[in-house]
Amino acid sequence: MIDKFKAAFREESYELLSQLEDTLLELESQPRNGELINAAFRAMHTVKGSSAMFGFETISKFTHEVETVLDQCRAGTLPITKDFIGLTLKARDHLRRLLEFEEPPPREVVADGETILARYRDYVATGAGLKPAPKVQDAAVTGEGATAPESTLQAQEGPSGPGPAAHESGLSTYRVFWKPKPEIFLDGTRVLSLVEELVGLGEAAVYPHTEDIPPLEAIDPERCYCFWDVVLTTQKTENDIRDVFIFVEDRSELRIERLAEAFLDEEGRAKRLGEILVERGVVSPESLREALGSQKRLGEVLVEKRVASKAEIDSALVEQEHLKKVQERSDPAAGSIRVASEKLDALVDLVGELVTLQARLSRTSFDLQDGPLASISEQFERLISQLRDNTMSIRMLPIGSTFNKFRRVVRDLSLELGKEAELVTEGAETELDKTVIEKLGDPLVHIIRNSLDHGIEKPSAREAAGKAPKGRILLSARHSGAYVLIQVADDGRGLDRDAIYQKAVERGLLAPGQEVADDELFLLIFAPGFSTAKVVSAVSGRGVGMDVVKREIDSLGGSVSLSSEPGRGTTITLKIPLTLAIIEGLLVRIAEEFYVIPLSSVDGCIEIRRSELASYGERRILSYRDELVPFVSLRESFETAGEEPEIEQIVIANSQECRVGFVVDQVVGDYQTVIKPLGRMFKDVEGVSGATILGDGTVALILDVNRLALAAQRDGAKRAARGGER
Amino acid sequence: MPTSKAETQGIVNLSGVLYTDRAAALKKELEEALAGSGPVLVSLSLVEDIDLACLQVLYAARRSAKALGREFHFVGSIPSRLCKRLCAAGFLRGHPERTEDIEAGLVEF
C-alpha cells in the first residue's frame, strides 16, 4: 500500500517540479513579481512536506534549505538574480533526480545536492551583504526600488507592472460595491454606462440591487434607487477599477476589496454561500451557525429569519458561481480525476477491439440479410462510433504541456552559446493524441537546438545586421483538418543556400550545376549526415539530428517542410496526424487482398477501363482536375498475382510532396481503421505503415501514402529515362 | 413625438433614447396606462438606448401593476443593443432573444 502512496507522491512531485520550472522561468523575466516568488516557495514547501511524510529524508532536508532561501527572497532580504534562477533550476533538476531513488540515494547524488546547497550558502552570504532588495510587493505598488542592485534582474513588465494584486496568471478577483447617491442623475451621469465600463475591465458577475425601487406612484423618476455588487476577475489593478468612478466618487459609495487568491476552502471546494455572506458582513458567524442547524437550504433559512434579504442571498450566489467558474478555468484539474496512462491505453485497445468486432457484426448482418439484426448492428455502430470519439478525446492533451520544457532548453542553450534568445509560443491549447505528443518531444528539441545554434546569431552580429540583440524563436501549433501543424520559426540568419548546394554536390546528392528549387534544396538538410557547419560543437554540426527528426516525423505519419529567407530566418513546419490509434480509412481491394488508404489523404476516385489504362503505356501520368498526376499500380507495387478487372479504380491521394494516383481493383468504401503496428519484422517494408483487422478477421495493410508517392516519382523518372533511351 | 400612447388604453409604445430627461414623462405615461383596466403592454421595439432612470420607472410600474393584480408585459421585439446594456449592468441573465424570455429574465422585475 505504501508503495502506491509513494508512487502518487512521486507523480505529484514531478508535476510540482514541472510547474516550478515554469514559475522560475517566468520569474527570470519578472523578478519582482511577488506572486511568482510565492508560487515557487509554495511548490518547494509542498514537496518538502510530502517527502517528509513518505520518508524521503534527503529530499525533505534539501527542500528545507532551498525553501529557507526562497523565504528570504520572499521577504525581500535577498535579490533575485539570473544566477539565483539558474541555481534554483539546478536545485529543481536535482530534486527530480532524487525522486528516482529510494531512500537513501547514492552518495554521489547526495554530494551533488551538497554542492548546490553550498552555492546557495555563498549566495546568501554575498546577497546578505547587498543593500536589502525592496520588498517585492511594495516595490510593485509604489514603483520604488526601480533602481535595484546591479546584480538584480530588471523587471521586464510593461510600465504599470503586474500590480499588487497580480495573480500567477496575472488575474485578480475583486469584489466591488457601488452605490450611487440618489441625486446622481441630476448632472446627467449615465449610470448604466459606468457599470458597463466596469464590466469591460474583465470577466464579471454583476448583481443589481433593485429592492429599493418603490412602486410607480411613489417613485421620484430623477432619483437613483439601485446599487451594485460586482465580482470582477481582471488583470487590472484596484486603481484602474477606481478610475472608472473617478468623476462620481464624491457622489457614490465605492468599496473595492481584493479577494484572497484562493477562493477555494482548505479542502479545495468552492467557497460556500455562508462563507461569502460572512465575508460580506451580511450575516454574523453566530447567525450562520444557527441557520446551518436547520434542514432547509441556508438561503431560505436566512431570509425567513430576516437575517439576510433575498437580494443579498442572490447576490452572494452570483459571486459563488463566478468564483467557481474562474477557479475551474485557472485550474483545469479541478473536477477531473487522475488516471494512469496505461489504463487509458488499455481502454483504447479495448475500443479498438470493439470497432473490429462491430465491423464483423455489420458484415454478418449484411450476409444474413436479417432486418432486426441489421437494425441492432446500425445502432451498435452509432454507439461504437461515439465511444471511439469520446475515448480518443480523453487521450487528447494540449500540446502546451510539451512547449513548456522547450523554454528551459532555449534558456540553458542560449546561455551556453553566449546568445540571447526568447521562445514565444502560440496555440499551446491545440490538442493532440497523447502518444503523438510523447513522440514529438525529441524532434522538436533537435529543431529548436538547431535554430539556436545555426539560426540565431550572436547579439553583436544581430545588431550589426540591424536586428534586436535578442533573437526570437516562435513555436506554434494549430489544427489543419486531421492534422496539426507545428512550426518552429526563428528570426536568425536563414539557411545558406550556397553552402547547402555545395555540400549537396560534394555528397553526390546533386550534379554540379543542377538546377534545384529552394524548398527542394533546403529539404536536403534532413539527409543523414548532412551538415554545413564548419565546426562541430557539443550542440550540433555532426549532421546527426535533423535526419532523425525526419525519420521520427515520418514514423508518425507526418511530414516536414521548410522555408528560409537569408537574414530573415527559417521556418520548419511539421504536419502531424491528430491520432495514431484509430483513423478513418478508405478500404480498397486488389485481387483477394485489402488495403486501407488514410481518408484524410484521399482527394478523389476515378473509374478507368483496363484498355484505357494500358494505353498510357510507360507514361503513367493522367490528367486530374487540370493537373498532371502520376499514378502507380498497387498490384505491381505489391506483386499481387491475378487478373485485373475490366474496370479499375484510381484513388487520387495527396502526399507530402505531390498528388499521386493508386490503381486498385475496387474501392470498397470508408472504414474505421484501428491501427495495429506491424512489428519489428516488417518495420522496414516500404509503402506500408501498419495493419488493421477487418470484420471477417482478415488483415488489411495500411498504406504509407508519402512513401508510395516517392516511389512512384522515382519509378516515373526511371520510366521517363527508359522512354528517352528508346 | 418619440413616445406615443396607442388609442387602446394600456399599450405604451416607446422609442428613441430613454435617458433621465424622459423619466418623468415615462412615469406619467405608465400611470395613465395603469389607470385603465386591461393589461399594460409596453413596446420597446423602437427604443435606441435606455439608462437607469427610465429602467427604474419600468420596474416601478411593473411592481405597481403586480400590486394591483394587473398584467404588465413587454410586446414586440427588444433591440439587441438594449439587451446588451441590460446584460452588462446585470439586469438580464444569459442572453435571451425572445421578448417573453427577456421579460422573465430581468432580475427581480
Image (cartoon, coloured by chain):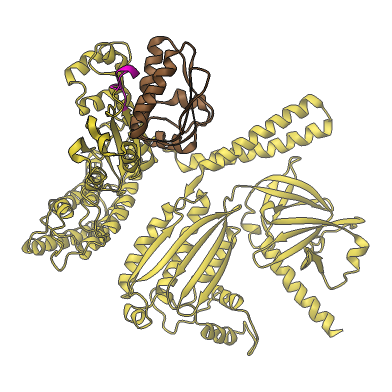
Chain colours: A yellow, B brown
Left/right of residue A86 with respect to residue A423 in the rendered view: left
Residue A653 on image: x %, y %: 72, 59
Which of the image's four quarters has the C terminus of chain A?
Answer: bottom right
The secondary structure that dominates the magenta segment is loop
Residue at 74%, 40% (x, y): give it: A695
* Residue A330 magenta: no
Q: Nearer the viewer, residue A38 or B32?
A: B32
Question: Picture quarter containing residue A618?
Answer: bottom right
Q: B78 above or below A297? A: below
Indicate the position of residue B29 as horizontal and vertical percent values.
Answer: 41, 23
Task: State the residue in front, A632 or A342.
Answer: A632
Q: Identify whether A66 is placed above or below A272.
A: below
Please, which residue is most extreme toward the bottom here?
Answer: A513
Q: Quadrant of the N terminus of chain A?
A: top left
Q: Is residue A277 above or below residue A354?
A: above
Is B19 situated left or right of A304 in this image?
right
| The image quarter in which residue B109 lies | top left
Q: Which residue occupies 77% across, 29% down?
A: A374
Q: Is there any visible trace of residue A685 in the rendered image?
A: no
Residue A240 x %, y %: 25, 48
Residue A577 place in picture, x, y as percent: 58, 54
Residue A616 showing in the rendered view: yes
Question: Viewer-proximal residue, A563 or A534?
Answer: A563
In the image, residue A215 lies in the stretch drawn in magenta = yes
**Residue at horizontal 29 percent and vertical 57 percent from the top:** A26
Decide if residue A116 is on the left or right side of residue A400: left
Q: Which residues are magenta?
A: A209-219
Count the marks: how many?
0
